[in-house]
Image: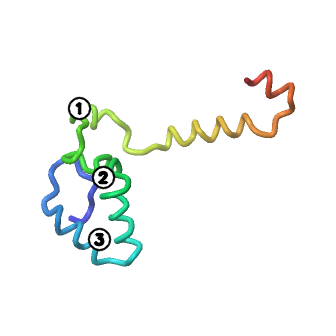
Amino acid sequence: MLSLSLLDAHPNFQRTLSVIRGGSQKAEAWLKDKLQTNKFALPMLHHPVSFIPEDIWHACPTTTNGNEQAHHNINHDGVHLTLLRGIMRG
């Protein structure tokens, strides 16, 4: 299994990282970013390296679609307004 998005311990985590490292330069840069720069990214994908309790992990949605839609609606409703409309919206 080459996916890193798992609840249980990965059967061969280090091999999967090696496969990613052995891929393209973009894949290697992506992995380096996830392991060194954005250290929060891997724990969001792979529960065994996360501090989130398992019951909360299961309760959370698997996508951010709801958040993205809310963000879009806020920006859609709040740009290019007249001064009066912006005050009324504010």
Tell me the residue that label 3 is attached to. Answer: 20
Farthest front residue in view: 37
Mark 3–mark 2 Cα distance, whole angstroms, equals 14 Å
Q: Nearer the viewer, residue 41 or 59?
A: 41
Q: Is residue 80 left or right of residue 69?
A: right
For label 3, the crowd category at 10 Å Cα-Cα, with few meaning under 14, some 14 to 19 and many 20 or more, is: some
**Is residue 86 positioned above or below 2 on the image?**
above
Element type at mark 1: helix
Q: Position of residue 21 (x, y in %)?
A: 28, 73
Badge nearest the viewer, 1 or 3: 3
Q: Position of residue 56 (x, y in %)?
A: 27, 32
Q: Nearer the viewer, residue 26 or 9?
A: 26
Q: Is residue 81 left or right of residue 5?
A: right
Mark 1–mark 3 Cα distance, whole angstroms, equals 30 Å
| Amino acid on which disc 3 is placed | Ile
Specify the quadrant that holds the N terminus: bottom left
For label 2, the crowd category at 10 Å Cα-Cα, with few meaning under 14, some 14 to 19 and many 20 or more, is: some
Q: Which mark is residue 55?
A: 1
Mark with earlier residue (2, 1) = 2
Residue at 37 percent of width and 44 percent of height: 62
Q: Confirm or deny contact between disc 2 and disc 1 (CB under 8 A).
A: no
**Is residue 46 positioned above or below 85 on the image?**
below
Q: Nearer the viewer, residue 22 or 66?
A: 22
For label 1, the crowd category at 10 Å Cα-Cα, with few meaning under 14, some 14 to 19 and many 20 or more, is: few
Tell me the residue that label 2 is attached to. Answer: 42
Q: Position of residue 90 (x, y in %)?
A: 73, 23
Element type at mark 3: helix
